Image (tube, rainbow, N blue to C red):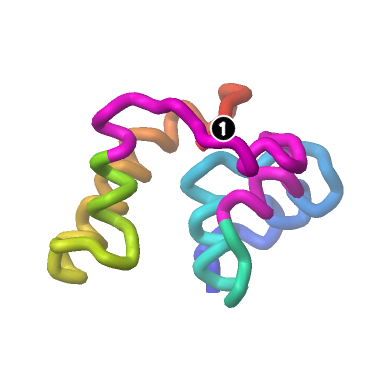
Amino acid sequence: MTKIDSGLLGRYFRGEIQPGPANLRRIQTAIPGTTMQELLVLAGRAERGQFDQPQVSHPLAQEVDRLLGDKSPLPEEERRLLVEMLERILDKYSNVQRIA
């Protein structure tokens, strides 16, 4: 369902490596009811309660969040293309310790 290699998933579950943002998004899509915040905490990329406070971010990040959110003005196909493009760009940085 995630299109992630089973060996790589095993390494995630054993705690050998942490999934990057693109694979966290794939895992979130495959597990109904999960949030990106929950997965970031489970992956050790964020602390519990970190998302309780408003986050200050770059204006472009806020715009992307708006465009991909539930009330997005973009058609579903364009949203999917935007997600794929961002995942490709960000995937090479997935080994860097950061929050998606």
Residue occupying image coordinates x 83% and y 43%: 15
Residue range highlighted in magenta: 36-62
* Badge 1 amino acid: Ile
Residue occupying image coordinates x 60% and y 36%: 53
Please say if 14 is above or below 35: above
Residue occupying image coordinates x 26% and y 65%: 71
Query: Residue 17 vs residue 15: left or right?
Result: left
Place of residue 94 in the rendered image (x, y in percent of width and height, measured from the top left):
52, 32
Q: Tell me, yes or no, if residue 84 can be seen here.
A: no
Q: Secondary structure at mark 1?
A: loop
Instruction: Confirm whether the magenta stretch covers residue 32.
Output: no
The N terminus sits in image quarter: bottom right
- Front in this rendered view, residue 68 or 53: 53
- Check disc 1: other Cα within 10 Å, few if <14, some if 14-19, many if 20+: few
- Front in this rendered view, residue 75 or 63: 63
Residue occupying image coordinates x 76% and y 42%: 48
Q: Residue furthest front?
A: 53
Place of residue 89 in the rendered image (x, y in percent of width and height, measured from the top left):
32, 34
Instruction: Confirm whether the magenta stretch covers residue 60.
Output: yes
- Front in this rendered view, residue 19 or 54: 54
Mark 1 = which residue? 99
Place of residue 37 in the rendered image (x, y in percent of width and height, measured from the top left):
61, 49
